[in-house]
Amino acid sequence: MKKLENIKIIFIDIDGTLTDSNKQLHSANIEAIKKVTDKNIYVVLCSGRTNQYVCDFSKKTNASNYVICCNGAFIYDYKNDKDIFSSKLNFNDVTTLWDYCLEHKLGCILNTKNKRYSNNYLYNVHDNSIETIRELSEVQEDIYQIVIDSNNYYKIKDVDEVIKKTESLGIANTSISFVDKIIDSSKYFFDVVNKNINKGDAIKYLLEYLGIKKEEAVCIGDHINDYQMFHEVGFKVAMGNANSELMKKSDYVTLSNDEDGVAYFLNHYI
């Protein structure tokens, strides 16, 4: 494959893409991104993670000052402290899920612009950035994403039906263990945002904001929440460790995340 021409922006997922299987960031990826941004090409990290997390990662990797977080529910320019796009959750629907999680002892994390709040039922999370609260009224900020987790497949399966019955909420991402119906997995989660919010629509919005054409954009991803990204760019790259369906939709499959697949693609084709 020849080098891609006239590329102005590259969207890159974080988990399973930019980081390895141990969630570590390799210097090879940092150096490759720096070479790309030195060519005045935007590199935008696009993740289901929180705004603060993605901003910190963007700074570590020499990426641009634009980030897409919470599975597309929030777009931020951290250099100019500007909210470019946001889709806050309906408080009544948040209350419905929060109360359900408390009743059924499910982990529930509420992601705002700068903070994370949770109940007492996180099954496997040790994160100092998460503040445990007793009442939903303690959150005085707009909520953009809810993360629900459990180590019980059937509890997660039931909450799926609760989400479907809400007025405005939808599942933007879920664990492969739930998709594949692995009953004995130790990890299940849902990332919940407003219906019709996803990484793809966020990319489309940011491209319009920056005045960049779809044909001038590339994305790199690995997971099921990256499907929508593939619809909004001109060239689609799947990681070597990607979901098989995502590979089928890609224009190119690079090396795995443990083999610095991002760096390999950027160094060879951009």
Image (spheres, rainbow, N blue to C red):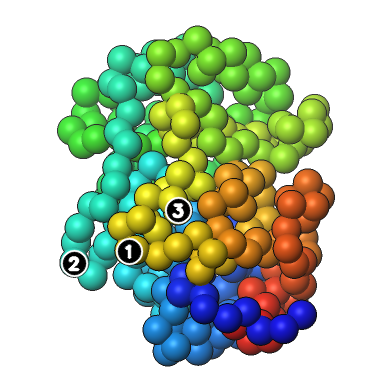
User: Which residue is the site of mark 3?
Assistant: 203
Which numbered disc flags the more N-terminal residue, 1 or 2? 2
Q: Please determine whether, in this image, residue 72 is positioned above or below residue 89.
A: below
Mark with earlier residue (3, 1): 3
Q: Marks 3 and 2: which is nearer the front?
A: 3
Residue 122 versus residue 232: which sits nearer the camera? 232
Q: Position of residue 142 (x, y in %)?
A: 24, 35
Eye-nearest disc, 3 or 1: 1
Q: Is residue 28 above or below residue 49?
A: below
Separation of disc 3 and disc 1 at Cα? 10 Å
Nearest-to-viewer mark from 1 and 2: 1
Residue occupying the point 50% across, 26% down: 170
Q: Is residue 119 above or below residue 157?
A: below
Q: Report which quarter residue 68 is drawn in.
A: bottom left
Q: Which residue is mark 1?
A: 210
The part of the image, by quadrant, that contains residue 176 is top right
| Percent of width and height locating residue 76 | 30, 56
Q: Quadrant of the C terminus?
A: bottom right
Is disc 2 placed on a helix, strand or loop? loop
Q: Is residue 66 left or right of residue 139?
A: right
Q: Which mark is residue 80?
A: 2
**Identity, as a three-letter code, of the amino acid under mark 3:** Ile
| Mark 3 vs mark 2, CA separation in Å | 19 Å
Q: Is residue 169 left or right of residue 185?
A: left
Mark 2 residue type: Asn
Q: Is residue 243 left or right of residue 263?
A: right
Q: Can I make out residue 124 in this image?
A: yes
Q: Is residue 48 visible to the viewer in this orientation of the structure?
A: no
